[in-house]
Image (cartoon, rainbow, N blue to C red):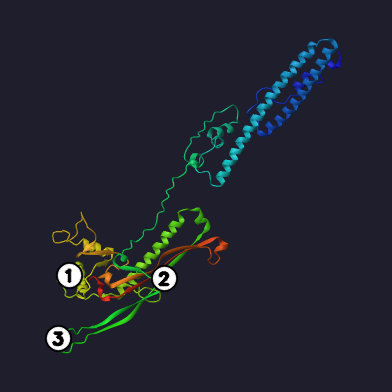
Amino acid sequence: MNKHMMPRVSLAALLAARPLAVIGAVRNDIDAGKLEQLLKDVKSEVGRVGDEVKRTAEDALKQSKDAGKTSDEVKAKADELLTMQAKLNDAQNKLEGKIEALETRNTDLEQKLANNRRGGGGGDDVKSFGQQVAGSDKLKQFVAQGAKGTIKIDVQNAITTAGGSAGTLIVPARDTEVVEIPRRQMTILNLLNSVPITVNSVEYARMVQRINAAAAVAEGDLKPESNYVWELDDAPVRTIAHWVPVSRQAMDDIPQLQGEIDGELRYGLELVKENEILKGDGTGQHLHGLVPQATDYNPAFAPADETDIDTLRLALLQASLAEYPADGIVLHPTRWAKIELTKDGQLRYIFANVVQMAGPQLWGRPVIATQAMAEPEFLTGAFRVAAKVYKRMDVEVLISSEDRDNFVKNMLTVRAEERLALAVKRPAALVTGEFQ
């Protein structure tokens, strides 16, 4: 027989040389290393069979040209080679799938071990499919028994609010309101007159002596001479100011930040201004306040079983006796609450109507309750006659980068300041003291 009509490798030799488990199902009891070697052998065998199929086809074509037909032996061997090639290809695909599954399992196991080493394997974490399979008790038992046959492992992948699931999609709602620290209500200026000025000091004449010799005089008699003495006094303008550094990025990126800073700086000035107007001691750059210049409480008489309400009425009387009818009372909020809660012998409130209150008033005068006053203190009198506030400059808030090294640091300085003067022209119109 012509040598071109026979395949170069016999079918018997090819079957004898095939690797273990190439033809048929890939077994589960082979480890990853053996699987890779087996896949290598199968690929090599697939290559050889492919070459034989090609040669057989060439022989068949040559026979057809020379003799007009192809021998039955060549046809049979070609069919066997094609069948062998299909089985080898199927075995190769199964081996590749098996190796890929093992690699996936190994990757999941390594990730789980790494998480445990980092302390990230918390019980509440959402596990991937691979992590759930690797940690399955069924898998552990299957491996311990030689990994023969097949097993079914159920995995859970419920969507939860945990960080590894849908938790990262949860975006909290944002309330744009900024929760501030409580602010004191400013009230003292409601009792005083204020006027604007354009100078840095206010001078005024204060009468310090009055000798009134006015009398009824007979016709032709010498008229009596009275004597009045004034002295010059002044109220210097003082500056109340403070500042805060802010980065330009923060100011640009947070739209409401400038407004918040502006409000806080203004509040800081108002807080200090109220304290200065009430209690400033006049030294250095301090205002000379109302309480330090007020007249000490000196009651005209001592009523029996004197109460706080009695004390305030006697202070009002003292101002009236000095010809300055009082127009207001200043107390600490706690003391005012004690007065409002005063009851008679039948536990009825003395003057307060808890259902309908027209406003904080006592003896017909408005009551200003502020923590700028100490708890046992009181101040009363004719405030609008006694003192005046002069405003040199209203509150001003400025922003500048021209401060020290602000420019190179991309910082801003936000400064707030106010300039004013306080003149207590009639100290006798104010009466201050402490409750017993």
Quick check: marks 1 and 2 in contact, CB under 8 Å? Answer: no
**Amino acid at circle 2:** Thr
| Quadrant of the rendering where the C terminus is positioned | bottom left
**Amino acid at circle 1:** Glu
Residue farthest top in this picture: 68
Q: Does label 3 or label 1 sit earlier along the sequence?
A: 3
Q: Position of residue 411 (x, y in %)?
A: 53, 61
Q: Is residue 75 left or right of residue 224?
A: right
Residue at numbered disc 3:
217
* Placement of 86 over or under 415, stated as above or below: above
Q: Find numbered disc 3 in the image and state the secondary structure of the residue it sits on.
A: loop
Q: Find numbered disc 2 in the image and state the secondary structure of the residue it sits on.
A: strand
Residue at numbered disc 1:
306
Residue at numbered disc 2:
239
Answer few, some or many: residues within 10 Å of disc 2's Cα (few below 14, many 20 plus, some between 14 and 19).
Answer: some
| Distance of label 3 from label 2 (alpha carbons) | 55 Å
Determine the image quadrant of residue 42.
Answer: top right
